[in-house]
Image (cartoon, helix red, strand yellow):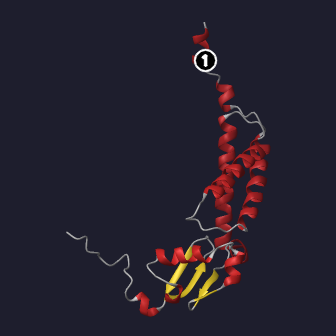
Amino acid sequence: MMMSGLFQLNLSELFIPSVPLPETFVRGTCTYLALFLMLRFFRRQTGSVGPADLLVLIIVADAAQNAMAADYTSITDGLLLVATIIFWECAIDYLAYHVKWFGRWIEQPPLPLVQDGTVCEENLRRELMTKDDLLSQVRQRGLCSLEQVRESYIEGNGRISVIPKQECAAVLPTSDTPTDSGG
């Protein structure tokens, strides 16, 4: 008797929205844009997601889901919510590309971290980045010290760019240079 319920399928529960579609769109829009604005000012290195960063992302995702979803149960509700998020992501990218003032407002300019081997301490503090973090990025680029760095920036996407001084650049391998594999 109990097995018969395992194979029943209620299509109306699957596809008929449980929340009005405009409400789902408005909830998704408001939550996405609010999170976008909050996270716009939280620029971190994209390649360094630590345990605390991961925890924040999980909590934000859970909180945002509750704000966006109401109590939806249908596939249609979920798909509309996903479509709303993708719509706003594409719309913001489109506007940033085609509307200059909007693009300048959305895309953060590069922030100097090193200028001619000298660390910009105030900018490191502003980004909550230690000198050891910066040195790690420099070493990952094949340089041994900050004296070998002409310029370094934290880019708008959170990545660190390192430009070596000319004499160092001549000895650094590039991705175009074939390397000897030893065999």
Task: State left or right for residue 67 relative to residue 162.
Answer: right
Please state which of residues 173 and 90 is positioned toward the viewer in this rendering. Answer: 173
Quadrant housing the N terminus: top right
Q: Residue furthest left?
A: 183
Please state which of residues 182 and 79 is positioned toward the viewer in this rendering. Answer: 182
Q: Which residue appears at 46% of the width and 82% of the height?
A: 144
Mark 1, residues whose alpha carbon is within 10 Å: few (<14), some, or many (≥20)?
few
Task: State left or right for residue 120 relative to residue 30.
Answer: left
Q: Residue furthest front?
A: 132
Residue type indicated by callout 1: Gln
Q: Which residue appears at 69% of the width and 27% of the height?
A: 13
Relative image position of residue 170 (x, y in whole percent): 38, 89
Q: Quadrant of residue 127?
A: bottom right
Reading the image, the residue beneath label 1 is: 8
Relative image position of residue 60 (x, y in whole percent): 71, 52
- Is 72 above or below relative to 80? above
Task: State left or right for residue 135 relative to residue 170.
Answer: right
**Total number of numbered labels?**
1
Q: Which residue appears at 69% of the width and 54% of the height?
A: 56
- Is 19 above or below relative to 130? above
Quadrant housing the C terminus: bottom left
Q: Under tag 1, what secondary structure?
A: loop
Q: Quadrant of residue 179?
A: bottom left
Relative image position of residue 137 (x, y in whole percent): 53, 75
Q: Quadrant of residue 178?
A: bottom left
- Is 41 above or below relative to 144? above
Q: Which residue appears at 64% of the width and 54% of the height?
A: 86
